[in-house]
Image (tube, grey):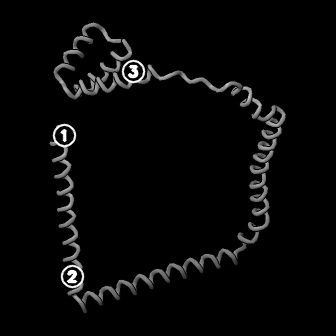
Amino acid sequence: MEHERFHTLMMDALDGELAAEEQTELESHLRACPACRQEWHAILAIDTLFRQAPMLSPAAGFTQRTVALLPSRRARLWAISIIYVLLLFSGILPILLVVWAANTIVPVISEPAFIDSVQQVWAQAVRLVGVISGALFKGLGELIVQQPAIVGWLLVLAGTVFVWNGVYRQLVNQTTAVSVRGNS
């Protein structure tokens, strides 16, 4: 936290915005802290390189060539008009399709025979799901009754997975703690 403050002071000193007491505080810290002193020398070297680099300017005629490549105002207006027309039709066509579908499909869907058939299909689907799930649970129950060793082995495997998961987490956290202590 303290080094962040001195890093900020270094940036201000580079810009020439330090007060006299901050300048003396930074200088005394740089004499005492070799890491900050090394960083300050690196910052000064980079700043010197940037100040010595020549200023670049665009090539002659760059602006004229760029403007010449831009489309004319008339072409832009046509493009924008086409985009607006496409957006208009893309908004209207779905609405027209919904109105057409409502006029042709709603009378068929609203007939009592259609509604009854949909209800029968749903009832059969619910019964089918019930039969399948009942058969699965019955088969699982019979397997457990006939082969209890399988359930025991599954419990042993699950316990092994949980134990090794705990060991792995402790190893990962331990290396993180060691690396944090090593960095301090």
**Point 19% across, 40% down: residue:** 183
Question: CA separation, marks 2 and 1?
Answer: 45 Å
- Label 1 residue SS: helix
Residue matched to label 2: 153
Q: Tell me which amino acid carries mark 1.
A: Asn
Asked if the residue under mark 3 is in contact with the one under mark 2, i.e. CB atoms within 8 Å, the reply is no
Which residue is at the front of the view, 167 or 20? 20
Q: Give the image location of residue 39, x and y in percent.
A: 28, 27
Question: CA separation, marks 2 and 3?
Answer: 70 Å
**Point 26% across, 12% down: residue:** 23
Q: Is residue 29 above or below residue 121?
A: above
Q: Tell me which amino acid carries mark 3.
A: Thr
Q: Earlier in the sequence, mark 2 or mark 1?
A: 2
- Residue mark closest to the camera, 1 vs 3: 3
Q: In the current view of this chain or complex, which residue is farthest to the bottom?
A: 146
Which residue is at the front of the view, 100 or 33? 33
Q: Earlier in the sequence, mark 1 or mark 3?
A: 3
**Point 56% across, 77% down: residue:** 122
- The quadrant holding residue 47 is top left
